[in-house]
Amino acid sequence: MAEFMGWVVTEMELQVVADVQRILFSMWEARNKLIFEEKPLSMASILARATTLVCPPPPPSSFFLANGGQGQGPGKWVRPAVDIVKVNVDAAVGRDKMAGFGMVARDNAGEVLAAAAKFATLALSPTVAEALCLRWAMELSVHLGFRRVQFETDYLPLFQAWKKANGTSYLFSIIYDCRSLLSAIDYVDFSFVRRQGKFCADYLARHAFTFQDVVWIEEGPPGLSSFLCSDILASMPDST
């Protein structure tokens, strides 16, 4: 199965990849219902369930992702070390200057420890929005009890400002707040990833206007499933 899915992901069009993932997830649900609830499901019902696992619709035209540049980070989601929680963060800013924040925390197996979305009713620039999103994600991580954390952003200006570490602008005051939160965490790493490596946080940020202010523990909204599956498959070790 791993070999088959590796072939699907690398050789097939994105729509085919999504369709295969939906069908497999629906089959897995049916398997669980049979084993744990003794409810057999027909193939027709399995396929019907698969059709409900649609890709998330595009966000309203008033929402766009801040373009932070590609930089030199990895182009896919990479699993953290065994004892590390990886927290991907992203902000989406509307033309009305409203912002949506998204974060997802996963372990080395790719399992979701927490996911969250927040709609910020503030007038924000993309850079400030990304910084506030990071601070929000760090606060959540502290409250959730994560003690060894790797935060990851695709917004290069924020990553560069973090490395610079000092300045007099509002951006640096937010970064200072972020650093003050880290005293409650035993180990912290902050890294940059290209956009392809954080589609889960992207999805949550884009749809924050729908979710408003929600934290999911050990799960996420239904529309997140296909992105989680893609990340897990992309992060699998090369068998060769």
Image (cartoon, rainbow, N blue to C red):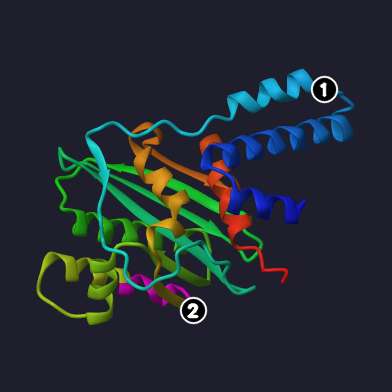
- Residue 227's place in the image compared with 39, above or below, is below
**Which sits in the foreground, 111 or 20?**
20
| Residue 41 image label | 1
Looking at the image, residue 233 lies above or below residue 45: below
Residue 235: quarter of image:
bottom right
Disc 2 from disc 1: Cα separation: 47 Å
Residue 54 location (% of width, % of height): 54, 29
108 on left or right of 153 = right
Quadrant in which residue 21 is drawn: top right
x, y (%) of residue 56?
46, 33
Q: Give the percent coordinates (x, y) of residue 31.
A: 82, 35
The residue shown at (67%, 55%) is 6
In this rendering, would 124 be left or right of 177? left
Instruction: Indicate the position of residue 141 as horizontal and vertical percent values.
Output: 46, 61
Q: Residues within 10 Å of mark 2 (few under 14, many from 20)?
A: few
Residue lying farthest left? 168
The residue carrying mark 2 is 187
If you read the primary sequence from the N terminus, does the residue marked by circle 2 or circle 1 appear first?
1
Q: Residue 112 shows which numbered tag?
A: none
Whether residue 126 can be seen here: yes
For disc 1, the neighbor class at 10 Å (few under 14, some 14 to 19, many from 20) is some
For the point 36% across and 45% down, the residue is 205
For the record, the magenta segment spans: 179-187
Q: Is residue 140 visible?
A: no
Taking 210 as reference, is 71 above or below it?
below
Does the stretch in magenta take in 186?
yes
Q: Nearer the viewer, residue 169 or 235?
A: 235
Circle 2: residue type: Tyr
